[in-house]
Amino acid sequence: MTAKIRGAVSVVTALKVTAMVNGFRNTKVCRKANVAAEHWAEARTYHWWNEGGSSLGRPAGYNAYDERFAKLYRRTLPIFKKYLP
């Protein structure tokens, strides 16, 4: 008798990553986990920046932009690594 494995993660060749931002779709087909995480973090950070999430002015707020991007990238990379090489 063989047991069926539920919830097994398999590697796929490409993943279509869509970041929904205020009803707008930002989609990209990614073949690597780091590209997918970078796309997701960039789309979300760009939205945050343009909606006034950074209370600092443009020149002074670049550090906040980089910190937010790095945080989102760091959080999503392990998730995308489950599905992409």
Image (cartoon, grey):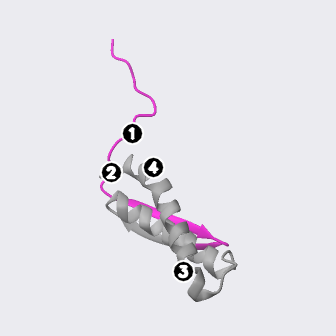
| Residue drawn at x 37%, y 65% as measured from the top left | 35
Mark in the foreground, 3 or 2: 3
Distance from disc 4 to disc 1, alpha carbons, whole Å, reads 11 Å
Contact? badges 4 and 1 (CB < 8 Å): no
**What crowding class fits label 1: few (fewer than 14 Cα within 10 Å), some (14-19), or many (20 or more)?**
few
**What crowding class fits label 3: few (fewer than 14 Cα within 10 Å), some (14-19), or many (20 or more)?**
some
Please give the residue where the numbered disc 2 appears in the rendered image.
12
Q: Amino acid at mark 3?
A: Tyr
Please give the residue where the numbered disc 1 appears in the rendered image.
9
Please give the residue where the numbered disc 4 appears in the rendered image.
79
Res. 10 image quadrant: top left
Q: Regarding mark 4 in the picture, which secondary structure is present there?
A: helix
Distance from disc 4 to disc 3, alpha carbons, whole Å, reads 26 Å
**What crowding class fits label 2: few (fewer than 14 Cα within 10 Å), some (14-19), or many (20 or more)?**
few
Q: Regarding mark 3 in the picture, which secondary structure is present there?
A: helix
User: What residue occupies the far front of the structure in this picture?
Assistant: 60
Query: Which residues are the magenta region?
Result: 1-25
Mark in the foreground, 4 or 1: 4
Please give the residue where the numbered disc 3 appears in the rendered image.
62
Res. 33 image quadrant: bottom left
Q: Amino acid at mark 2?
A: Val
* Viewer-closest of 45 and 11: 45
Contact? badges 3 and 2 (CB < 8 Å): no
40 shown above or below 49: above
**What crowding class fits label 4: few (fewer than 14 Cα within 10 Å), some (14-19), or many (20 or more)?**
few
| Residue drawn at x 67%, y 72% as measured from the top left | 22
